[in-house]
Amino acid sequence: MFKNRLFRYLDLIILIIVLIVFVIVVVIANGVRDRQVLQRDNYSAAVTQNYGQLLESLGPRNEQLRADIQSHLKLIRNGGQLSNPYGPSWTVPATENTQLVDAVIEVQQSLGRQDFEYFATSYEKFVGLSAKVSSQAMQRLERRQYVTASIIIVGFLGVLGILFFRLGRADDATQQITTENNHILAAMEDGLFLIDEEFQIGQQKSAAVQHIFGTNIQVEGGFFDFLSRFVSREELLVSKEYLELLFAGRVKPKLMADLNPLKEVVAAAVQKSGLVTKRFLDFSFTRDDQDRKSKRVLVTISDVTKEVLLRRELESTKEMQKERMSMLLSLLHIENAELNGFLDHSDDVLNEINDILADENANHRAIVDKLAKIYQLAHKLKGDAGAVWIGLLESSIHRFEESIEDIKKNPYLDGRNILPLTVQLKDMISEIDLVRSLVVQMNLIAAAHFPAAVSPGVEADSRATTVIAELVTDQPDMQADKQDGSQDIRKRLSTLAQGVAKREGKEVQLDCSSFDLFGENSELQDAIYSISVQLVRNSITHGIELPERRKRAGKSRRGHVSVLLSKMDDGRVQLIVRDDGAGLQFDRIRQHVAEQGIVDKIEAESLGSKDLLPFIFIPGFSLSQGVGIDAGRGVGLDIVKSQVKKCSGTIAVKSADTKYSQFTITVPTVLV
């Protein structure tokens, strides 16, 4: 780069050097000469003046004085060596001034004639003329110095003119390049900027940078300070190692591109309109391999939001198709009464959620209460969906729950915040309609291929699912089982247990007693069933250990959950849900209530096992490490508590560490 600049301005540099040398030579030469001439002329003038004064004081008849004057006049006329007893001597050239020569001759002639009076008069005239000639010489010297200075100034001005001309051309070229670069950078859809080896962001950036990151993020300063807003500490360290490796230049560019850790980075940008947009960004880095000494890397930031969302949509569509196929296959194994009952129940729950959302009371407290009630209804419905093995709806309800949790995090809730829930609710209603339409289509197919199986006068609607159930199971006596609601509930709980255990990676055997104690009291049966769903799910997710852990503890790999329903002597109904899992882990409960600030740490240490039991029924209380489709929100036992309270019943809890947990629910047969 330095060599390029040197050759570019070589002519200008040579001109400046020549001018400087010329100025130095002229100044030095003139200075030396002028100083010598000035000293010589001043001394000569002083000698002339001194002889004049001596002539006045000693008179023209002083022989020695006349001899000295004669010698001095000869030196002036003919030239020679001017001696200074107190300093340097000079070679004096013969004077070229004719007036001064005539004056010298006149003085010399008066001396030859011994005309002393005329000698004094002519010498006095010579002194005056000498002073005048000396003054004229000084003026000529000053003019010469002025001319020299003028030449120097003109030379400098010329150089400056050339310099400004060249710089002007360079500025014009630079301005043109800058303008073209700005047009290019403005037209680029990707964000572009440079970082140096100190990882500092350069000043020039493409216009897309600000559009990508919005008004809330300034792209300046240290690159990693800027990057820390979007990535975790671990990703930041990996990115730093990657860039250090890139600057070192020891790895092939293709391999470096494959190692790039900054793909699909999530950034939230505030646009000028105030709208917050979520973007997915790809960072790529390019080093100039042709210049090994390059200390800068070009950073390219591409907005890949559309691509990511499209890919996710395609993946979601594929997953939904897979779930729908799975649901279609599962429908083949669900009995008509059971499926119709679930669909009708789902309609009721979703309509109830819709009514709550339609409530115009939009103050913060009312919305919080709405969300809590909606969440509880959705969670119960999710359990029912899992019990009949409709995974598509179960997944949709879980996403609905996650949306509710996200909305609850907003400290300034109003009616607009819950609008997204209405969209998701509409999707779930559509999924229920989809199940109904699939049932209708299956029955139409069945009616076409097996007309004998359809009773005369039976329409091809959702009620015709009995045909498929009969054909698939090939059990003529299935109709009797379908009349047994108890059998349906036991099957649902078994299906639920299988689904939860599979998702949790556990092995579980469910033992379930008959639910035929309720007679015509379907309301009580539904309540006990809902409680059973939550307690079975809770036992598998929180109680039963993973197979390997159970094996290390000396237990069988398969956990056991029992659901026992019995009628007491006083007419009440008792439900016992027991598992042979890890127990309630009271130490963790004690620690959790202290960490959550429910009670202070000192008070928590003093609480016994019995004192800790009420806390597990608090809404939102959960010991799960993460949130999944089956646990993590702390809702299940809250639903149990609400249902038991609604039935005017009681809850008793027993547990032994590493051995078992047992929930005993007692309710009257007549609901108040």
Image (tube, grey):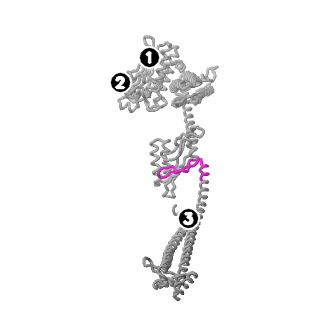
Would you call the spot at circle 2 few (<14 residues within 10 Å), some (14-19), or many (20 or more)? few
Tell me the magenta residue range.
Answer: 181-207
- SS for dot 3: loop
Q: Which mark is residue 606?
A: 2
Q: Of circles 3 and 2, which is in front?
A: 3
Q: Position of residue 611 (x, y in %)?
A: 38, 21
Query: Of the residues under marks 1 and 3, which one precedes in the sequence?
Result: 3
Q: Which residue is mark 3?
A: 9
Looking at the image, which residue is at 51% across and 62% down?
2
**In this rendering, is residue 475 above or below 6?**
above
Would you call the spot at circle 3 few (<14 residues within 10 Å), some (14-19), or many (20 or more)? few
Using the image as rendered, state which of residue 50 and residue 88 is in the foreground. 50
Q: Which mark is residue 308?
A: none
Q: Position of residue 307 (x, y in %)?
A: 57, 42
- SS for dot 1: strand
Using the image as rendered, state which of residue 417 and residue 522 is in the foreground. 417
Q: Amino acid at mark 3?
A: Tyr
Q: In whole angstroms, how far apart are the C-alphas of marks 3 and 2?
A: 87 Å
Q: Is residue 581 visible?
A: no
Q: Which residue is mark 1?
A: 650
- SS for dot 2: helix
Q: Is residue 653 magenta?
A: no
Query: Of the residues under marks 3 and 2, which one precedes in the sequence?
Result: 3
Q: In whole angstroms, how far apart are the C-alphas of marks 1 and 3?
A: 97 Å
Q: Amino acid at mark 2?
A: Ser
